[in-house]
Every structure is written in structure tokens, then in C-alpha cells.
Image (tube, rainbow, N blue to C red):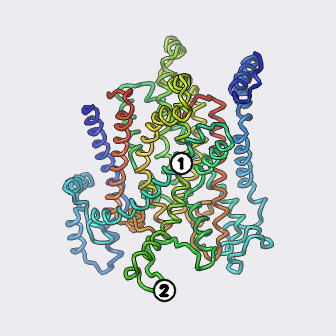
């Protein structure tokens, strides 16, 4: 087993290097930093430009620049952001907790809602409940996330009277109302802060979880259905076990293997999907940071977050593969 | 077969249906059989009808509306729904919403169709070559596919669209670059089993060239699957295009597309919330219908298939 893991790990590290090379070349082609410097400061002298070129290593061919970047990156230095003049890695690490905070809540809600529905649908296959949820799952898979989010914003944030509106920008309000007075968020009592945070969570969580629910409902339903058709489930029924026990101990445990794997695999997707979600809701997470970086030509920062997301994708697919083999002893390591 | 009238066992009725089909199979050609099975799938038929309507609406746009989709009129800003002459209202610069929806469909649907067909054909061809030749070529291609699977697509699409976006064709190219890998892997798996069949051995025995075997004997056998991935692919292409346009980096913002209209409507949530409803509804209907049709096609072509 260790041999399998090590070989897979090496293969994926290689893939990571290839992705970083391709991404570096791609981002390197995108704009001309010298031109950018000239637009920002039209009075700049040629000597200053030359000094900048030398300092940034722009006179070197791109593959050499890649190796410089790689050497620094392997030492933990991912460069300095062109927008904020701070190390990009530090910026990313400041924003990631906000993204995890939102996405973890969404993931937990999805699991808590989708699994029971999927199980119930599979056990009562072809019932009315099953048809309704299969159709809703279809609709959920087709609904464009950003449209659904905007509809929710209009429904709960724009149309209701001012007192009942839910906030839809950012993680916290700048000011909150305490006893009829407007005070800054920092000086508000703990409970008011908590309620304010909760209010800001409602719309992003609602839109994010409803759209992603569909996939997991369909997946858990079909996973359980597949297991229910197996011979050992028939055996369990034949020897007279109560239906509850057949489903919840014999069938469900085996159906959980593919479900757990797909959940692990979906985690990097949550981070990538945060890009749109955080853009719409002005959520100060890494998705918004990445998008702003791309829009403002901040390539060192964009490169760092793309590498972070690729790293997540590679690592989580590896974990999913290993856990699949780990959970299901029938799968041999090759 | 004796008829079992037991409502708790629907599968027995299913068997009877299948038997009747086998008995009369001789009367139908392959194509007729597929269409017959497809039309039994009600949601797929509904999807097909909706797609037809959407295509007709965008094709007949000049006849269904006498407005110019790009003509602005600042005296007619933010007309609400059901205003006389503008039954879906007007946007922030007085352009007719209904007209823009019709013309927007042209761009969005074209990107969906062209993008999905190109990436399915390209992926199919790469997959066939990879599966047929095997060996080093196969492992190189499969490593490339693996790399594409490990790339976080959305951020890379955003970077690419930010610089090469703007024109419809560039968006299609960008989407195809990231769309072929899945199809290639699927088709490769099929080709691996097809190439062991006797008819391939026979064609090799009579001296067919490799190119001929791939194009004339293997490729047609994967067409059914390609058709299904293509149909499902159109939906996801439309979704990606509208996502990029919504973020403001897709097709040039002056061109009406459903994504662009939503992106624009986002800025006027307080003045004109009704502008959000229609473009999103059209995107939703289009994706839903293509998914239904894709599902129906898959069931009609091969019920055991898993995509």
C-alpha cells in the first residue's frame, strides 16, 4: 500500500510542476510590466526602467524566470503582490479562513440535507417523493449559480421593507444598531456581532448550498440503489433481517464508500467555485482576492492562488483515491 | 408470457414491454428504434421542444421584434414589465429587453453548439487515436488528460478570458481547450474494448490502413456516446459562457448574450430587479432542456451506459 501511495504522490507532484510551468508561461505572456510601469508613471526615466527590468529579472528568458520563481517558491517565497506590496502567500493565508468559514458551513448543510433525501429517494424508488426530488435535483443541476444568487438577493435583500432586508455584501456590517444608536461593529456587544454575522451568512449559504445539493442527492440516490440491487442485500433480506437493518447497516455502509469519495473530491471545487460566489456577495475570501488579482494585472498573486488551487485539486483527488482503496478492501493497490 | 397484475412489482411489466420490443424488432431500423425509445422519455421530448422554441426564437429574432438590440434611447430607461411596446420592459439605456433576449440567444446558443460539437469531435478523435495505438502515445496523451483534470478550470478560464475574451470565437476556443479532455478519456475507454472485436481484426486482415480503421470502423462505433456527451456538453458550454460574461470578461459587453444581460442587470438591482429574471430563466431553460435531451438520448442509445 505504501508503495502505491508513494508512486501516486510522485506522479501528482510531477503534474503539479507541469501545471506551474504552464501557468507561469501563460501569465507571463499576459501583459508587459514595463508598459504598465509607463502608464502608471509617464515621467519615468529609461534608467529607472532598466533598473526595474534588472530587479524583476525581465531581461532573462521566460524559462529562466520560471526557474527563479520555482526556486523561491520552494523556499516559501511566492513573490510580492503588485497591488498590495505584501508577500502573496501571506495575503492568501489571511483570506483563506474566510473562504473556509463560508464553504465549510455550506458543505455541512449539503451533507445534512442531501444524504437523507438521497437515501429516502433510493429506498422509496419510483414513489412520488422520489419523482419530485429527482426532478428538483435535475433543476438544481441546471440552475446557473449566479442567477439563483441574484434572485435570492432580490427576494430577501431588495424587495422586503428596510427593516426586514438581509444584507448581501461582505461578512460583517461596518456599523450596527444597538439600542437605537448606530455604533461601529467593533464596539458592539458580542451577541449583536453574532447576529450580524449570522445575517450576512444567510444569503451566501442558502444560494451556495441549494445549487450544490442537487448533485449530491442524485449521486447518493444512485449509489444506494446500486448497492440495494446486490446479492448480499438480497441475502440479508432472505434471512429475515428487518428492512431497517438491511438498509442502514448492510446497504448504507457500502453505499457510503463512493459518497465519501465524491465528497472529498468536491472540496477543491468548492474553493474554485468561491470565485463567483465571493464576487457576488463581496465576501472577503480567496476567491475574490484571486478575481481582483486577475482583473488588476496582479500576476504574482494570481499565480500563487492558482498554484494553491491546483495543489488542493491534486491532493484531494489523491486522498479520494487512497480513501477509496482504504475503505473498500476489494480494490487492490497496483 | 402471463401477465402479472401485481402493482408492487413494476419490473414484471417492464419485462413484458421489452419482450414485445424484441418480437417486433425486425420491423424497425436502428434509427427508428432509437427515435421510438427516445420519444417514450417524456421529459426528453419536453426538452427537445423547448430547445426548438429557443432556436426558432433566436433565428426569427428580426421578425419577432422590430427594435434594434443595440439601439439606446435614454428617454426610455427602466420601463417595467408590460409597458406598451416593450412587454418585458427596457434596460438601463432604454434597449428593449425582449429584443436583446432574442438576439442574445443567437450568441449563447451558437457558443453552446459550436463549442460542444468541436470539443466532442476533437476529444473523440484524440481518444480514438490514444486507445487504438496504445503504448507510449497512449500514456503521453493520458498524462496530458490527467493534467487537464488537475487544473482548477474556473480561475484559468478567468485568466484566459480576461486576455483573449471579447470575441465569440475566442471564447469558443478557450472553452474547447478545456472541454475535450473528459470526452477523450471516455472514448479511449470504449476504443480499448472495440479494438479487440473481430470486425477490427477482419479489417486489418484485408489490409485496411490504421487511419481507415480508426475513421471508418472505430469512430462510427463511438458516435452514439459522442452524441450524448455533445448534448450534455452544450448545456455546460452555455453555463461557462454565461458565467464568464456575467463576470464581465466573456463576450464583449455591448453584444447581447444572456450572461452579459445578467451582468448588466446586477448593477441595477434596486432600480429594476425585473431585468434579472429573464436572461437567467433562458439560461436555466436551455441547460435544463439539453440535460433532459442528453439523458433521453443516453437511455435510448444504451440504457446501461454511465456518463
At x 64% / y 42%, what residue is drawn?
A130
Say whether residue B198 is left or right of residue B25.
Answer: left
Could you tell me if residue B307 is visible in this image?
no
Say whether residue A201 is left or right of residue A64.
Answer: right
Between A214 and B283, the one nearer to me in the picture: A214
Q: To which chain does the residue with label 2 belong?
A: A
**1 and 2 marks in contact (CB < 8 Å):** no
Does B202 sit above or below residue A230? above
Within 10 Å of the Cα at label 1, are there few (<14), some (14-19), or many (20+) other Cα atoms? many
Say whether residue B301 is left or right of residue A297.
Answer: right
- Disc number for residue A114: 1
Determine which quarter of the picture holds residue A322.
top left
At x 47% / y 69%, what residue is drawn?
A198
Where residue B271 appears, as percent x and y from the top left, is: 63, 77
Does A251 sit above or below residue B148? above
Determine which quarter of the picture holds residue B229.
top right
Where residue A117 appears, as percent x and y from the top left, is: 57, 46
Say whether residue A6 is left or right of residue B93.
Answer: left
Determine which quarter of the picture holds residue B95.
bottom right
Between A81 and A204, the one nearer to me in the picture: A204
Does A194 sit above or below residue B46? below
In the rendered image, residues at marks 1 and 2 fall on the same chain: yes
- Disc number for residue B78: none
Where residue A179 appears, as percent x and y from the top left, is: 48, 86
Within 10 Å of the Cα at label 2, are there few (<14), some (14-19), or many (20+) other Cα atoms? few
Could you tell me if residue A317 is visible in this image?
yes
Where residue A155 appears, as percent x and y from the top left, is: 62, 68
Of the image marks 1 and 2, the number of the one nearer the N terminus: 1
Local secondary structure at mark 2: loop
Q: Quadrant of the N terminus of chain B?
A: top right
The residue carrying mark 2 is A179
Amino acid at each position: 500500500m505504501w508503495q502505491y501511495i508513494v508512486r501516486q504522490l510522485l506522479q501528482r507532484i510531477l503534474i503539479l510542476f507541469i501545471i506551474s510551468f504552464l501557468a507561469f508561461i501563460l501569465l507571463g505572456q499576459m501583459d508587459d510590466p514595463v508598459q504598465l510601469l509607463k502608464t502608471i508613471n509617464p515621467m519615468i526615466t529609461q534608467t529607472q526602467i532598466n533598473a526595474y527590468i534588472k530587479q524583476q529579472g525581465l531581461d532573462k528568458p521566460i524559462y529562466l524566470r520560471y526557474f527563479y520563481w520555482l526556486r523561491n517558491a520552494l523556499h516559501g517565497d511566492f513573490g510580492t503582490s503588485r497591488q498590495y506590496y505584501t508577500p502573496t502567500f501571506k495575503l492568501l493565508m489571511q483570506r483563506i479562513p474566510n473562504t473556509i468559514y463560508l464553504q465549510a458551513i455550506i458543505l455541512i448543510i449539503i451533507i445534512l440535507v442531501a444524504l437523507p433525501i438521497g437515501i429516502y429517494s433510493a429506498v422509496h424508488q419510483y414513489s412520488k417523493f422520489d419523482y419530485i426530488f429527482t426532478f428538483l435535483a435535475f433543476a438544481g443541476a441546471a440552475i446557473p449559480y449566479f442567477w439563483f444568487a441574484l434572485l435570492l438577493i432580490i427576494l430577501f435583500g431588495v424587495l422586503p421593507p428596510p427593516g426586514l432586508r438581509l444584507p448581501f455584501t461582505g461578512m460583517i456590517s461596518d456599523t450596527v444598531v444597538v439600542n437605537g444608536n448606530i455604533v461601529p461593529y467593533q464596539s458592539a456587544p458580542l451577541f449583536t456581532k453574532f447576529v450580524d454575522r449570522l445575517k450576512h451568512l444567510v444569503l451566501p449559504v442558502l444560494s451556495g448550498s441549494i445549487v450544490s445539493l442537487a448533485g449530491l442527492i442524485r449521486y447518493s440516490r444512485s449509489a444506494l440503489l446500486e448497492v440495494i440491487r446486490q446479492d448480499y442485500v438480497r441475502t440479508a433480506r432472505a434471512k429475515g433481517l428487518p428492512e431497517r437493518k438491511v438498509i442502514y447497516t448492510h446497504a448504507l455502509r457500502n453505499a457510503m464508500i463512493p459518497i465519501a469519495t465524491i465528497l472529498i473530491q468536491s472540496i477543491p471545487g468548492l474553493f474554485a467555485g468561491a470565485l463567483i460566489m465571493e464576487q457576488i456577495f463581496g465576501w472577503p475570501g480567496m476567491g475574490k482576492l484571486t478575481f481582483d488579482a486577475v482583473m488588476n494585472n496582479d500576476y504574482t498573486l494570481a499565480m500563487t492562488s492558482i498554484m494553491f488551487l491546483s495543489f488542493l485539486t491534486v491532493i484531494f483527488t489523491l486522498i479520494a483515491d487512497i480513501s477509496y482503496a482504504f475503505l473498500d478492501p476489494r480494490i487492490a493497490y497496483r | 408470457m402471463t401477465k402479472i397484475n401485481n402493482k408492487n412489482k413494476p419490473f414484471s411489466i417492464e419485462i413484458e414491454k421489452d419482450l414485445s420490443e424484441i418480437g417486433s424488432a425486425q420491423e424497425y431500423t436502428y434509427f427508428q428504434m432509437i427515435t421510438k425509445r427516445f420519444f417514450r422519455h417524456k421529459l426528453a421530448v419536453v426538452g427537445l421542444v423547448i430547445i426548438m422554441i429557443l432556436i426558432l426564437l433566436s433565428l426569427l429574432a428580426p421578425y419577432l421584434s422590430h427594435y434594434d438590440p443595440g439601439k439606446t434611447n435614454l428617454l426610455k430607461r427602466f420601463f417595467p414589465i408590460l409597458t406598451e411596446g416593450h412587454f418585458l420592459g427596457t434596460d438601463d439605456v432604454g434597449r428593449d429587453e425582449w429584443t436583446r433576449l432574442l438576439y442574445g440567444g443567437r450568441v449563447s446558443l451558437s457558443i453552446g453548439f459550436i463549442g460542444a460539437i468541436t470539443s466532442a469531435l476533437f476529444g473523440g478523435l484524440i481518444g480514438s487515436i490514444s486507445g487504438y495505438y496504445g503504448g507510449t502515445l497512449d500514456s503521453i496523451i493520458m498524462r496530458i488528460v490527467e493534467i487537464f483534470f488537475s487544473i482548477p478550470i474556473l480561475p484559468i478560464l478567468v485568466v484566459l478570458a480576461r486576455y483573449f475574451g471579447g470575441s465569440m470565437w475566442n471564447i469558443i476556443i478557450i472553452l474547447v481547450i478545456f472541454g475535450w479532455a473528459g470526452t477523450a478519456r471516455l472514448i479511449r475507454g470504449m476504443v480499448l474494448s472495440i479494438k479487440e472485436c473481430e470486425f477490427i481484426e477482419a479489417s486489418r486482415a484485408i489490409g485496411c490502413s490504421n487511419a481507415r480503421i480508426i475513421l471508418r470502423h472505430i469512430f462510427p462505433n463511438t458516435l452514439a456516446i459522442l452524441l450524448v456527451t455533445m448534448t450534455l456538453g452544450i448545456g455546460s458550454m452555455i453555463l461557462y459562457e454565461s458565467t464568464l460574461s456575467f463576470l464581465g470578461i466573456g463576450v464583449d459587453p455591448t453584444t447581447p448574450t444572456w450572461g452579459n444581460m445578467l451582468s448588466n442587470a446586477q448593477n441595477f438591482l434596486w432600480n429594476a430587479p425585473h431585468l434579472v429574471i429573464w436572461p437567467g430563466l433562458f439560461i436555466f431553460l436551455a441547460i435544463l432542456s439539453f440535460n433532459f435531451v442528453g439523458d433521453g438520448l443516453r437511455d435510448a442509445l444504451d440504457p446501461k451506459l454511465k456518463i
